[in-house]
Amino acid sequence: MRKFVLLTLLVIFGLGLSLPLSAEATETKSYSNEVKVSISSSGSKTIRINSPYQLLNLTTNQTTIIPANTIINIETKDSKVVVSFKDFNQSSVKGFKLQELEGPHKIVEFTTSTPLRKGATDNYPIVKTLNKGENAHYLSQFVNAANELWYRVTTGAYTGWVKATTVILKDAPTLSLATLDNDANYRGSFILEMNKSNSLEIINFLDIEDYLKGVVPCEMPASWPMEALKAQAIVARSYAMKASVLTNTTASQVYGGYNREHERTNRAIQETEGLVVKYNGKVIQTFFHSTSGGKTANVWDVWNSSPSVYPYLSSVTDIYEVSPYSNWTKTFGPNTILQSFGFPLTAKIYDIKLEKTGANGEVSGVTLYTSVGSKTIRGNENTIRRLFPLNGSTYLYSNWFIMNLVKTLPVSVQTKISIQQIPDIKGKTIQTVNEQIPFKSSKIQIQTANGIITINEEVTSIILEGKGWGHRVGMSQYGAKGFAEHNWKAEDIVKYYFPGTTISK
């Protein structure tokens, strides 16, 4: 009996020599000035990571380290977000966080088929077999009683020990990037959740300075003068700090992620780091647009706002702006306008009237007179621009325009030579039995068996002559370029477009 106990103790002691040390702590990266931006809304996505990330299940709070170079599949199913990769599969009602890890950190790459064991000797059970070329996240190392070096690693759903001779230990990339299936690379971390439309939404959260690296070159050509790029960086930073929701489109600021970064715009961001626009000591939301057309707009003339609340969003003259969109002309057919107003395409347009309430002549209302009735649509610049879509989907360049109508009278007359269509009968004369009678109006009244009918001129073409591109509130980007070309500094450019403001951290 004593021999058996002694043998058991020796076995336990022997195994104890190869028990693992505690794993090194793995910390996720935090961002001092964090912003969140929606980068995708769809039914499913794949994300490929170039370095280890931590996956946090927001329902169970369970964490999992995902190895570098893993392709992660994400979808929604049964009102849950489902994440899977290799032999890992989890679902969560609340979604997940895919979190960047604090570096530096290491990975192991398997040089041969390798067993992952529960302990640091060949005596421990095999948890999983890893294939040549796969990798895992390195946690710690241990030398066992046989003087063998073993690494403790984790690979998604499994954590265990591998013999050092079967792997290559190397540093993970210092810049963590996640690649969506559209080949767009992003810095930072991600929220994977189901939105109100029951679609998968991916939200990128990261430090604002890294976010700007993917914004500024998307909003302004990197080849433009450095002071213009700096002005764009200051304005974009202020906008992001005040915006409640950020997207990667023109709905807020265009954000292209890591792929769109450029050395010159990164420099502009670095040299203006932390600088924001303030009014009465508080950061303001700074709007910008492509082209003002010679004058920026008062915010209260294009949106439902108050001059007393936003005095710094007032109209200024763009003295140096030179842009292909400073002046433009667009022509529309009747069907486009009928469709915008919700009238049948069989209707005839008789007239269109504009309401111009803006200080510079910005349009705030349009009335359409047709053969089936009239309708007035009033609203902010967005509403008005939607009434005149370009290429079937893009809004009109701005709501600062004048209109010319081409009209035709849908009647023909018999002359001595032939039947001809008369574009306008006003000023023409008609020969009766007794005399020639001039037409004082463009309308024609004809007696029929059922009564008198009136024939009106019909609008056949709508020509708009306008200025600017965008809402025209705040900073004109082409204007900033012009100021920079005339040796203005970035801070002075920004303060010009936002009267009464200061620039500071």
Image: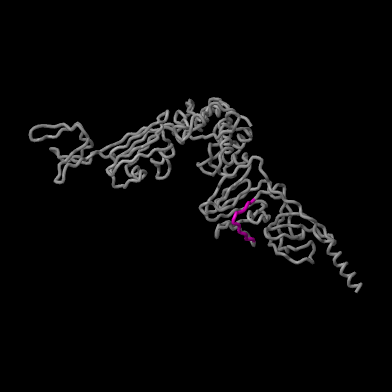
* Residue 353 picture location, percent across and down: 33, 35
Residue placed at 63% from the left, 46% from the top?
188
* Residue 264 picture location, percent across and down: 59, 36
203 sits to left or right of 146: left
In this view, the residue in front, 271 or 205, is 205
Residue 363, picture quadrant: top left
Quarter of the figure that contains the C terminus: top right
Q: Residue furthest right?
A: 2
Residue 95 part of the magenta segment: yes
In this view, the residue in front, 419 or 13, is 13
Q: Main secondary structure of the magenta part?
A: strand
Q: Is residue 240 visible?
A: yes
Residue 291 part of the magenta segment: no
325 sits to left or right of 171: left
In this view, the residue in front, 483 or 15, is 15
In this view, the residue in front, 14 or 376, is 376
Q: Residue furthest left?
A: 434
* Residue 65 picture location, percent across and down: 68, 55
Query: Vertically, is 181 above or below 233?
Result: below
Query: Vertically, is 203 above or below 367?
Result: below
Q: Is residue 66 visible?
A: no
134 sits to left or right of 39: right
Q: Which region of the structure is painted magenta?
A: 88-98
* Residue 284 picture location, percent across and down: 56, 33
The total number of labels drawn is 0
Quarter of the figure that contains the N terminus: bottom right
Residue 90, picture quadrant: bottom right
Its colouring scheme is one colour
